[in-house]
Image (cartoon, rainbow, N blue to C red):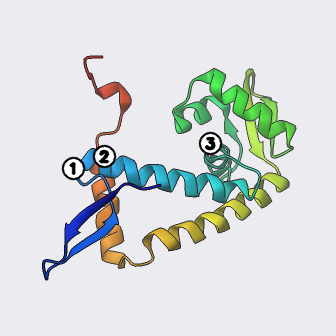
Amino acid sequence: MAAREVTQDTAGTPSTEAAEPHYRLAFLLAYHGNITDGLIRKAVATAGLSPRHVATLQLLTEGPVSQKALIEGLGVDPSVLVALLNGLENDELVRRRRDPADRRRHIVEITEEGAARLRKADAALDTVEQELFGELSERETAALRKVFAKLRTDPEAFSCGE
């Protein structure tokens, strides 16, 4: 249940509204980010996927990719990628094979079933984005993208003293 706060409207009449964390911009971003994360997870689950599965499958839509390229594209540890690919391969959404030119390399490609599930997830994400951003003009959406691009969100760039 959301916290409630009492405010005064423009006529000075007390009103109660759901309290959002207006206090700090980072809290406001986290608040809306957590809600959005939940909506995204629910949407992609309709296709039997997680957000990381969707990101992985999206990187494979242009054609076969090396595991190394996937590690770089997703920004994950190799062990995390192997676990992701194991699950996707078990569900027959991706196929891994040795690179004939270099038997040490693995090439990953999306299957027809993987592409179908990705389309389903994308359709569900379109609905989420329409709900979230439908009130924004194209100009406001572009401005929001510019702001997000400027955010410093690399966890390794921070030292909190903890």
Question: Does dot 1 land on a helix, a strand or a loop?
Answer: loop
- The relative height of residue 97 versus residue 20 in the rendered view (above or below) is above
- The relative height of residue 162 versus residue 53 in the rendered view (above or below) is above
Which residue does the image show at 65% across and 59% down from the upper left?
Answer: 43
Residue located farthest toward the bottom when viewing the structure as drawn: 11
Q: CA distance from mark 2 to mark 3?
A: 24 Å
- The crowd level at tag 3 (other Cα within 10 Å; few <14, some 14-19, many 20+) is some
Which residue does the image show at 40% across and 78% down from the upper left?
Answer: 135
Q: CA distance from mark 3 to mark 1?
A: 32 Å
Question: Does dot 3 land on a helix, a strand or a loop?
Answer: helix
Q: From the viewer's side, name the closer residue of 60 and 14.
A: 14
- The crowd level at tag 1 (other Cα within 10 Å; few <14, some 14-19, many 20+) is few
Q: Position of residue 88 (x, y in %)?
A: 78, 40
Quadrant of the image containing the C terminus = top left
| 39 with respect to 120 (left or right) | left
Q: Position of residue 19 (x, y in %)?
A: 32, 58
Badge nearest the viewer, 3 or 1: 1
Which residue is denoted by mark 1 in the rendering? 23
Which residue does the image show at 37% across and 47% down from the upper left?
Answer: 30
Which residue is denoted by mark 3 in the rendering? 52
Which residue is denoted by mark 2 in the rendering? 27
Residue located farthest toward the front when viewing the structure as drawn: 14
| 22 with respect to 112 (left or right) | left
